[in-house]
Image: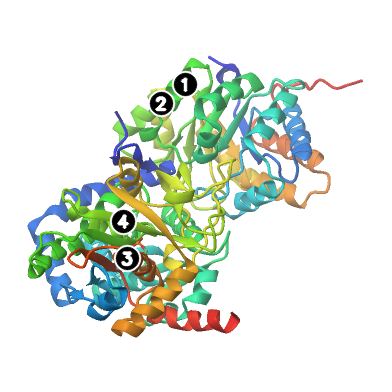
Amino acid sequence: MRKKGYFGQFGGQFVPELLMPALYELEEGFNTIGQSPEFKDELTDLLHNYAGRPTPLYFAKRLTEKTGGAKIVLKREDLNHTGSHKLNNCLGQVLLAHKMGKKNIIAETGAGQHGVATATVCALMGLNCQVYMGVEDIKRQQLNVLRMRLLGAEVTPVTSGTQTLKDATSEAMRAWISTVKHTQYVLGSVVGPHPFPLMVREFQSIIGREVREQITRFGLDEPDVIVACVGGGSNAIGIFFPFFHSNAELVGVEAGGYSERIGDNAASINYGKVGVFHGEKSYFLQDENGQIIPAHSVAAGLDYPGVGPEHAYYAESGRASYVTVTDAEAIAAFKLLSHTEGIIPALESAHAVAHAVKIAADMQKEKMVLINLSGRGDKDSQSLQTEEGRA
Amino acid sequence: MNRLEKHLREVKLRDEKAAIFFITAGDPSLKETFNIMLHLAENGADCIELGMPFSDPIADGPVIQRSTLRALKQNVRLEDILKLVQQFRKKSPAPVVVMGYYNPIIRYGVDRFIQDCVSSGIDGLIIADLPYEEGEDIEKICKENNTSLIYLLAPDIDPKRTRAIVRASSGFIYCVAHYSTTGTHKQNDDKVLPQTIKSLQDMTDLSVALGFGISSLEKAKELSRLADGIIIGSWLIQELESATDKAECAANFVNNVKAAINNHRGKLFSVKREC
Ligand SMILES: Cc1ncc(COP(=O)(O)O)c(C=O)c1O
């Protein structure tokens, strides 16, 4: 067997030949340097003293009262440095690239959160950083573009295709093909070819590992339900994976957009079909000829027509379930959490909030629903206002 | 040995260099593609690489991306491409391989696609995002159907892996001149590239063709000297873009390239014409 990096039938390495040597080099680096005690100590130190981890596990009392059902608890990734879980992965990957002697880092970004996190760690380690971002996303995530530039990164506008995350990823892959010997591509989610899904999972699992310790405060080993939004799926895997062998019910929330119609949403598991794209075998939004269909979500970070292979596997095997939340529901949850708890969530995370509130209402008061609050919503406040103005 | 391998071997035995041309099926229309194919063949193309358009061609530079977009606007599907080659086969025996990305083939059905390729007269497949690691199953199907599966190879990679890929290859060896997307002009490594090709030629009887970024007759000449043949894509597509008579443009193009890389034009494929 030549293939590797599979979760059941999903995953693999479907990339142009020119990228294979780089994937081997990265895998080797991850398996040696990345597993060394020195690397792990340095990463842990950065996570604690630079990123500000562990992030709190917070009982949302007013939201729980308002919902009138199960206890709602938030894992506060919004309080991670740079404002989302994305930094966990970037600290890991950029530190690894640095140790492997790479001087140049490239990344794709949708919401700009992964771009900001990458630019941040590159600034910290003195590496060159170039971020590919769709023109459409540049428009709706202005604040993050400014932040990346302040951090010294070069933001390269992508004008091909739908000018969103899908196209930014394609362009970053093309750039990597041409610069592969001196450049490391830092992928922002548990997607793409092996070893990315595995590596990003390892770096994001800090979220779930912390929860395991923190939840004992409530006299529990595990929550009854864990809810996380799923774009590529990194914040979700980060909190699901450490609870894989537990009784906790795992629920991923995909972006339902305006409707179930293909092109109106970004729910690859719910509305897509199995295929191969951007290096992995998984579920993708596509037409009957196998052309990839542009996704839509009000949340730029969920606006991607595919999903990580491990989620495809969890979905197929039934370990996790995947539901959808529409744009309108997410916006309502965005406001709800802001008003009741004084926490402005990222629009991505608001998808998880919307579903959690829906199910918590029908659960007994002793039960607990845990939301992975993947990021904060400062970046969305402006575009939401424009959206409201239009309505 | 299928038609493609047989033909390339004849070229090599005649001490000539092979010229392989890439165009996108359906750019600007299927009818034009048909005409261009006939003129490429008639003027001595040793193989036509027919691009199957995909929404997100991650291995391609701007020229082929544009070409792909024009073809997608025509809603070109794999079914149409199979039909196109069927029509072409009634007129010409010139080898044809299809090149594309994996997802549309999966959607169509891998087994069914390869069988339909064979019955349409397609001699081989290149799948841009299917590296050796993932090719085991499709290799088997291709072998059963006497169809070539052509892998790409890059200079300067682990010799063990190179050997494994060469062993798994059929049709020809597609060696990429440098690390880039298609159509990028980059300086080749003067030392590494000749060594790579030499070692490939020592490993196999298949022809070794060099591609990526050939955009002038000088470059064509220079690279053809290193290998058994060359592959030209973006340059031809760029010429076709601005030509009003695209068939004539294709004919002249092939003639010029063939003249540049060989002292004489070599054996031409005669095309059956209605009288
Ligand atoms: C706050 C936040 N949450 C979630 C996501 C979605 O990514 P993933 O599914 O990999 O967690 C993003 C992506 O940009 C994000 O910024």
Q: Chain of mark 3?
A: A
Q: Which residue is mark 3?
A: A356
Q: Which residue is mark 1?
A: B141
Q: Amino acid at mark 1?
A: Ile
Q: Chain of mark 4?
A: A
Question: Distance of mark 3 from mark 4, alpha carbons?
Answer: 9 Å
Disc sitting over residue B1 in the figure: none
Does residue A344 appear in this view?
Answer: no
Q: Comparing marks 3 and 4, which lies closer to the viewer?
A: 3
Q: Is residue A300 or residue A58 the one in the foreground?
A: A58
| Residue found at x 31% / y 31% | A2
Q: Which residue is mark 2?
A: B137
Q: Is residue B268 or residue A142 the one in the foreground?
A: A142
Q: Position of residue A73 (x, y in %)?
A: 22, 71
Q: Decide if ligand 1 comes within 8 Å of the CB at mark 1.
A: no
Q: Earlier in the sequence, mark 3 or mark 4?
A: 4
On whether disc 2 and disc 4 are found on a single subunit, the reply is no
